[in-house]
Amino acid sequence: MVIESVADEGRTFEPHAAFVQQARISSKEEYDALYKRSMDDPEGFWGELAAQELHWFKPWDKVLQWDEPTVQWFAGGQLNISYNCLDRHLTGARRHKAALVWEGEPGDSVTLTYAQLHHQVCLFANTLKKLGVEKGDRVAIYLPMIPEAAVAMLACARIGAVHSVVFGGFSAESLKGRLVDAGVKVVITADGGWRRGSIVPLKANVDKAVQGTAVESVLVVRRTAQKIDWHEERDYWWHELQQTVSAICPAEPMDSEDMLFILYTSGTTGKPKGVVHTTGGYNLYTHITSQWLFDLKDTDLYWCTADVGWITGHSYTVYGPLSNGATSFMYEGAPNFPDNGRFWQLIEKYGINILYTAPTAIRAFMKWGEDWPGRYDLSSLRLLGTVGEPINPEAWMWYSEVIGAGKGPTPAPIVDTWWMTETGGHMLATFPGAHTMRPGCAGLPFPGVEADVVDREGNPVPVGEGGYLVIKRPWPSMIRTVYGNPDRYRQNYWEQVPGVFFSGDGAVKGENGYFKVLGRVDDVLSVSGHRLGTMEIESALVSHPMVAEAAVVGKPDDIKGEAICAYVTLNEADQDQSQEELIQVLKKHVVAQIGAIARPDEIHFTEQLPKTRSGKIMRRLLRSIASGEEIAGDMSTLEDRSVLDKLRGS
Ligand code: WT7
């Protein structure tokens, strides 16, 4: 393992007394007691919470059944997450409370109360039924960040259809791969979405993607009113079909382990994997993490800035907050449209109380300068969250001082949350009313989570030393399988280090039990908080006829965390374009294959890639070259040393 030991240094901060006083979990002792109970008696702990916090149509037989790597939570129990997010809030004071508050990029806005959201979801669910969607069928959602994205997810959940949300920034090719892998029957899209003043051509991408797949119908939401191609036999307008269906649609009782959704995420191979989440455990875990870590109150307006195309949007824009009866804010567009102050303007205009965003965004705000937030009244903010990558202490301090501190009645605590698509919900975190904050440290495990830092054999490494971050027992919202590929599930997560869940991150545990996450230890990049497999980008590059071979590595980047750096060898016959032209052609090609998030920042041409004698590309060396570091470590396996000198010159 190449991670060196990291000392537990740095400043610490305590949550403000006025915050602590009203916090849901308001002392370290309270957290410790919850944690201890969850470890000593996991079934009692989770069973009580499940009974107290969720509505069940039928009680479960057994809280936890663990037969590695297969887990069952609340087996025999029946519930519906859409019921828990909607129906149960309709009988009391929350009926006419805002569930979703939304603003579009052009400045239009919509508020949906719980009663209105329930009505929309029922219409949408009946529309899906009319299109032939049945329990267990897969439905893809390829929408902008508009209220209909949440409506569509809840509608699928309501009738037991499995949703697979695909981020609108992914290309037609990427969408197609997911449609095929999941065997999708219906695609829900829009005539476009607004992003930085332009229209994202979602429907045109769907038209390309569905060709040659099993997709039977495309349901189109009108958003931009731009002209789109129409296929009578397959395409339907949502605003037309909803006129033809009933608004009565009871929630389907689902088995606790029935599949809720598939969400694709990048791994170490060329093909993204379909992470499967099920109903009961996911509902409970996203519910309770939202409540305890965001300290959600009925009076809060809470904003998670992630797109619903990512797990963060699933768990913490839609399901977690709505299950709690909270008010969740959604924004369609870019943070710098029409200018760099858009987020702060939204916070002032709506009086947002809780903000959950990513370090990459914070670093961009830092670059844009304090003037932008300085123009707005941010005094409504009472809690700040961060997710997606390790937050550098500079960004943490800026977030705390410029956005959170002293602007409101009390300075806002910062809640760091480490988790991943596979974990479904927060795993390591700083409890806002109970924990000392340590900038750069994710924090302590959530109750029920047994986290550790180990070596390849699974032996705990000494405190203060780097190792692999693993989870030693199942938790309710954990990944159940990789869709259609149980072997990959077992190998990827339970066999890397035998018997424990392998996260793919490196970490260090301090004396105080805090975890500092160091980043990925596999061939996965974290670019602007998004996971991208190096193999995925390499496959996209070599799918271009001019490319013979490609190696992709990450390079530290001030804003994006990691920038994408590609080394490419070309097929000789095609070398008559200028280098600059070729670079542009290949960048465009990757964007068309995957999406704009995967556009390489740098492409270097080389005659040869550094390889071992057995022919493996030595990415470690390329990483050093890309970041301009001295090449250290063992080079005895390198086949041809002269390659390195040539690469340094490129
Ligand atoms: C990877 C998971 C679910 C969160 C959104 C990304 C990195 C995430 C943190 C954090 C340090 C973090 C890890 C992880 N990561 N949050 N607070 N501190 N690293 O979900 O796309 O599944 O990516 O994001 O490297 O493995 P994802």
Image (spheres, rainbow, N blue to C red):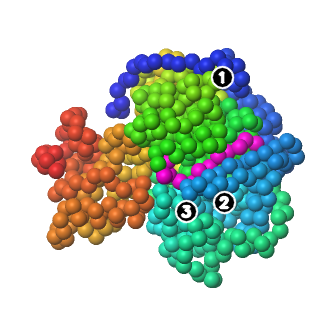
Q: Is residue 43 left or right of residue 383?
A: right
**Residue 501: quarter of image:** top right
Q: Earlier in the sequence, mark 1 or mark 2?
A: 1
Q: Which residue is mark 3?
A: 193
On the image, the x and y values in percent for residue 397 come to 46, 27
Amino acid type shown at disc 1: Phe
**Residue 34: quarter of image:** top right
Q: Which residue is mark 2?
A: 148
Whether label 2 touches label 3, CB < 8 Å = no
Q: Magenta part of the protein: which range? A: 325-338
Q: Earlier in the sequence, mark 1 or mark 3?
A: 1
What residue is rendered at 41% in x and 40% in y? Answer: 368
From the viewer's perspective, is residue 242 above or below residue 18? below
**Residue 366: quarter of image:** top left
Q: Secondary structure at mark 2?
A: helix
Residue 144 part of the magenta segment:
no
What residue is rendered at 48% in x and 67% in y? Answer: 172
From the viewer's perspective, is residue 509 above or below residue 304? above
Q: Earlier in the sequence, mark 2 or mark 3?
A: 2
Q: Is residue 417 left or right of residue 642?
A: right
Q: Which residue is mark 1?
A: 19
Cα distance between the residues tagged 1 and 3: 38 Å
Q: Is residue 127 left or right of residue 144?
A: right
Whether the residue carrying mark 3 lies under 8 Å from ligand 1 is answered with no
